[in-house]
Image (cartoon, rainbow, N blue to C red):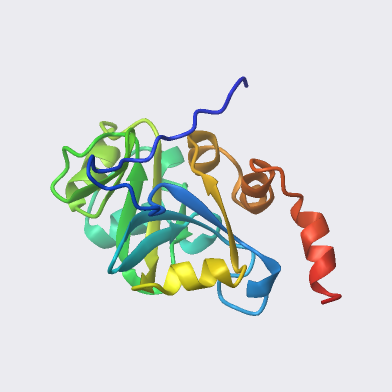
Amino acid sequence: MGNTPIIPAARAADDNRDFLACQLLIALPALADSPFARSVALICQHDDEGAMGIVVNRAAEYTLGDVFEQMGIASQDATLCAQPVLAGGPVHPERGFVLHDGGDQWDSSLAIADGLSVTTSRDILEAMARGDGPANVAVALGCAGWGAGQLESELVDNSWLTAPADTELLFNTPLDRRWQTAAARIGVDMARMADYSGHA
């Protein structure tokens, strides 16, 4: 398919700190007994007060059609309605988060990077149901959160690898391949890492 487009991280002009917005967190064997085992999370926001991300490789029990029905939104697009919803994390599991490449013209959006946003308002779901939504979309229920300094501490403890986010992984790679694929982007073979975890 050619080169996979890496999403350039958005950064304020006066901010040269090493925050991780628009990076993927890839769970290492140290997290094997945690709810984040074998997970890949996209960091949407990271600053001095903590971080927020969305797990992008686990399916929830719901489809997008279930979400539309619960919100009273009608759609005749059977393929769209059958799309699985992501289990985005344990924080606010009742709340929807829409990752997409459709800009920030929606009522409540956060620009994660150039060409990637997360929206929490109903209007984007209504546009999707009409066929007017962004070209690339992933809907998640819930998110993951870290307090001030917590994510940095977990990185020091070798709980996560980090890799740049890319559109192919976020929107096209099958969910059950995203953990291995994300690690392979930075030259790590997770099959070999998993082997080592049992012999520490």
> What residue appears at the point 37 percent right and 30 percent down from the top-left corner?
135
> What residue appears at the point 65 percent right and 79 percent down from the top-left corner?
33
Indicate left or right for 138 with 32 as reference.
left
Indicate left or right for 156 with 48 as reference.
right
Rendered position, 85 above or below 83: below
> What residue appears at the point 56 percent right and 75 percent down from the top-left corner?
35
Rendered position, 38 above or below 92: above
Quarter containing the C terminus: bottom right
Q: Residue furthest top?
A: 2
Quarter containing the N terminus: top right
Indicate left or right for 107 with 139 as reference.
left
In the rendered image, residue 94, in percent from the top left (x then y), is placed at 32, 70
In the rendered image, residue 164, in percent from the top left (x then y), is placed at 51, 43
Rendered position, 119 above or below 168: below
Q: How many marks?
A: 0
Front one among 51 and 90: 51
Front one among 79 and 160: 160
In the rendered image, residue 162, in percent from the top left (x then y), is placed at 55, 53
Q: Quadrant of residue 131?
A: top left
In the rendered image, residue 22, in percent from the top left (x then y), is placed at 41, 47
Q: Residue furthest bottom?
A: 33
Rendered position, 11 above or below 25: above
Front one among 75 and 120: 120
Front one among 138 and 32: 32
> What residue appears at the point 42 percent right and 74 percent down from the top-left corner?
150
